Image (spheres, helix red, strand yellow):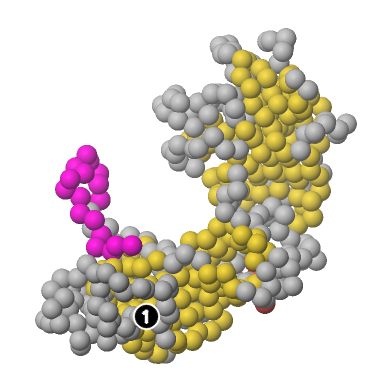
Amino acid sequence: MKISLKILPSLFLIGTFFIFQSAHSQTDWLLDNSSYKAKIIEGSGELELTNGLVTRVIKISPNAATIRLDNLTSGESYLRGVKPEAEIQINGVNYEVGGLKGQPNYAFLKEEWIKNLHNSNAAMQFDGYEILVTETPFEWAKVRYGDSDRPWPPKGVHLRLDFKLPEQNKLLESDDPLPSFLGKEKIYSTEFNELDPTWSTHESISHPRSSFENEGKMGEIYTLQNTAVYVERKLEEDTKIIEATFSTGTDQSKEYGPGITLVWPDQTIKFFLKPGGNNFDDGIPMFGLWNGKEQIRAAGGRQKLDLSTPWSLRFRITEEAVYCEAKPKNGVWMTIETLPAFSSMPTHVRIGKSDGKGNAQDADELGELVRLQVLDFALYGSIDQSVKNSLQPGDVTVSVHYELYDGIPVFGKWITVKNQSAKDINLDEFTSEIIAAVEYESKVEVRENTVFKNPIFM
């Protein structure tokens, strides 16, 4: 979803209503709810929304994050982890909205851990709050199945938390896998409309049609499944990100899946897609990695990738480590594996199909002819603070709204985005609520009818 936001209006996004299943309290709220009045308690560095049935406590320093979500009638605590209050992607950059870091174990949350949680400089930063009256989400005609005298909007309390974008230097200093273009000069890029002279080509001799250009389309590889067809070029010394995008097409390779190979005089490292899985998970698409010493047969853990969409792979090179990262089309970067920092930079890069170590050797069993495509390739240099992000902290305000109602264990929550700049922005994705909730029961066997669900309903 892409929505262009103009300078003046706010964009209201989809919200959520949470209903808590409550045990019987001393006074059953279903029979008499008159004593359960919603209120907001302003404490030292905390805000609490409570109505005697449920409570939500939000810590607002050093950033805003929910630290308690409790059922007061049963004494149950639903929260096992502190998460951002929302997530939003603007102009291709993914931002956590608030949140706190440093929880040592996400299986449970101890009270004594909370004071040691710290802010993430890459997240949107808490910028104030306001206590308001409840809002009318839509007009209610009151023609059927309702009390015509019932107040609308429902009585309760409304809390709005405001967040601003992080400072660019703080964002770039974070360890989060950010978009490649953010704060970096692009050294080189191509969409393979043609092959410029900086590239050399290796094409398998196992079939006369093996090629990096098929039917006039540069970057479309046509070859036997377990053969090597790739292009290679010299790397600039100041390269810090090496990125390429692949559509795996009909390829069902395992070790010969398409990817990026870094080349030194005495070794190679290959990060790649494995459409055919591995010998233990045949036909299950996953990531592969030759780390220079051994084959990581299920890089990033066993998972089933959706290869119906193109995937971008990249090496992100820092002084502390080298990150093997990936993202689906229109997705966000994920760190799949982390390698030790390089003692020296690779001299060349190969893009396309190669053997499991990134070399030109064809397999003994060649397989059928397959068709796949390398869609683009790019190199980026070091972080440069003079390369400005298009958005500054004051350009966008994201507000997170909470409502709690009288006499019922229900929260309402939604977010609004206000463009305060003179330029259009793209809102790509959003998540309005993230709750790390306690599991009532883990399903470790096929016992689906006996697994109890968490009593939070949306």
Quadrant of the image for the C terminus?
bottom left
Examine the residues drawn in magenta and state their main secondary structure. Answer: loop
Question: Would you call the spot at circle 1 few (<14 residues within 10 Å), some (14-19), or many (20 or more)?
Answer: some
x, y (%) of residue 18? 33, 68
Quadrant of the image for the N terminus?
bottom right
Tell me the residue at 69%/10% (across/down).
Answer: 207
Q: Which residue is mark 1?
A: 153
x, y (%) of residue 174? 61, 64
Q: Quadrant of residue 324?
A: top right
Tell me the residue at 22%/39% (across/down).
Answer: 446
In this view of the protein, which residue sits in the foreground, 124 or 49?
A: 49
**As shown in the figure, which amino acid type bears the numbered disc 1?**
Pro
Residue 370 vertical placement versus 91 (above, below): above
Left or right position of 126 against 193: left
Instruction: Assess whether residue 115 is covered by the magenta stretch.
Output: no
Q: Which region of the structure is painted magenta? A: 442-458
Q: Quadrant of residue 41?
A: bottom left
Instruction: Assess whether residue 446 is covered by the magenta stretch.
Output: yes
Q: Is residue 180 visible?
A: yes
